[in-house]
Amino acid sequence: MTTAFLVDSHCHLDFPDFEGEQADLIARAAEAGVTRMVTICTRLRLEPQVRAMAEAHAPVFYAAGTHPMSAAEEPLATVDELVALAEHPKFVGIGETGLDYHYTAKSKDIQQQSLRIHIEAARRTGLPLIIHARAADEDMARILAEEHAAGAYSCVMHCFSSGRALAEAALDLGFYLSMSGIAAFPKSGELREIFAMAPRDRILVETDSPYLAPPPHRGKRNEPAYVAHTARVGAEAMGMEFEEFARQTTANFDRLFTRAATPGAAQDAPATASGRG
């Protein structure tokens, strides 16, 4: 029997929902075939405790940035600050950053300023940018394209649930789309169609736990082990066998998140290559 190994490319193991349970969460993930995970620090002042979590657990890597919904209440990050954090060997990405006009449209100017700072840090470090985008598709597509024209960088559109136009804009820049539990919801057919039209080598899978648990756990606390449920739905949407989807998304992760790649993982396709096909 083939064993399918998966990666949870985006979770939040430091959130209070998981307090004191990290070792058990990681063990349950391993039982489900999830061998690695990236935990995301959303406020830079909390980076030390997220770093410590990655240092304590071999399967855990981490990234850090200022979440757009917190951009107005947290100190503005500097490029130098982010570049310094990136010196840690288990620090694998810049963010999450981005734009969120759904709840925090009033802070859109500072969000955009913060986003551009994070992009420059991604450019300087060579680490992938991790983007949160909600209700800001036009500004997001414009800024990503402007910045990419000024100097290439790699990027993943985390928990992608925006429209087709932003998906195509991101893919045309060589970026990746990450599938969360939202894509597994019964009414997310249009979103599944967007993933199905994307190149197979540009798709990741994630939980965004403790949020957005896929069926059959919808409405409950999410955790890294549940990425397997989303992966099964993703495989069906893309017309792939589950094991093939797992291998493909893991290879994609290794190509983008090079610091977290398994030894010997192929790095043959640059994340900044343009085009969707």
Image (cartoon, grey):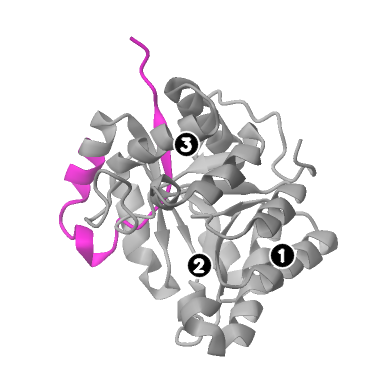
Whether 23 is among the magenta residues is yes
Farthest bottom residue? 106
Mark seen at residue 65: 2
CB atoms of marks 3 and 1 within 8 Å: no
Q: Amino acid at mark 2?
A: Gly
- In this rendering, the answer to whether 144 lies above or below 59 is below
Estimate the x, y position of residue 223 in percent, counting from the top left. Answer: 27, 49
Q: Residue at x 39, y 43 (%)?
A: 37
Q: CA distance from mark 3 to mark 1?
A: 24 Å
Q: Amino acid at mark 1?
A: Ala
Give the mark, 3 or 2, whose residue is nearer the N terminus: 2
Residue at (84% x, 61% y) in the render:
149
The magenta region covers 1-27
On the image, the x and y values in percent for residue 219 come to 24, 57
Which kind of residue does numbered mark 3 sit on?
Answer: Gly
241 w.r.t. 113: above or below: above
Closer-to-camera residue (143/56): 143
Q: Is residue 118 left or right of residue 187?
A: right
Q: Quadrant of residue 201?
A: top right
Q: Mark 3 vs mark 2: give the one in front.
A: 3
Could you classify mark 1 by the number of other residues whose Cα lies within 10 Å: few (under 14), some (14-19), or many (20 or more)?
some
Residue 59 seen in this snapshot: no
Q: CA distance from mark 3 to mark 2?
A: 28 Å
Query: Which residue carries the number 1 mark?
Result: 141
Q: Nearer the viewer, mark 3 or mark 1?
A: 3
Residue for badge 3: 234
* Residue with the most extreme right position: 149
Label 1: state its secondary structure: helix
Pick the residue in front: 125 or 11: 11
> Under tag 2, what secondary structure?
loop
Q: Position of residue 180 (x, y in %)?
A: 43, 49
- For marks 3 and 1, the one nearer the N-term is 1
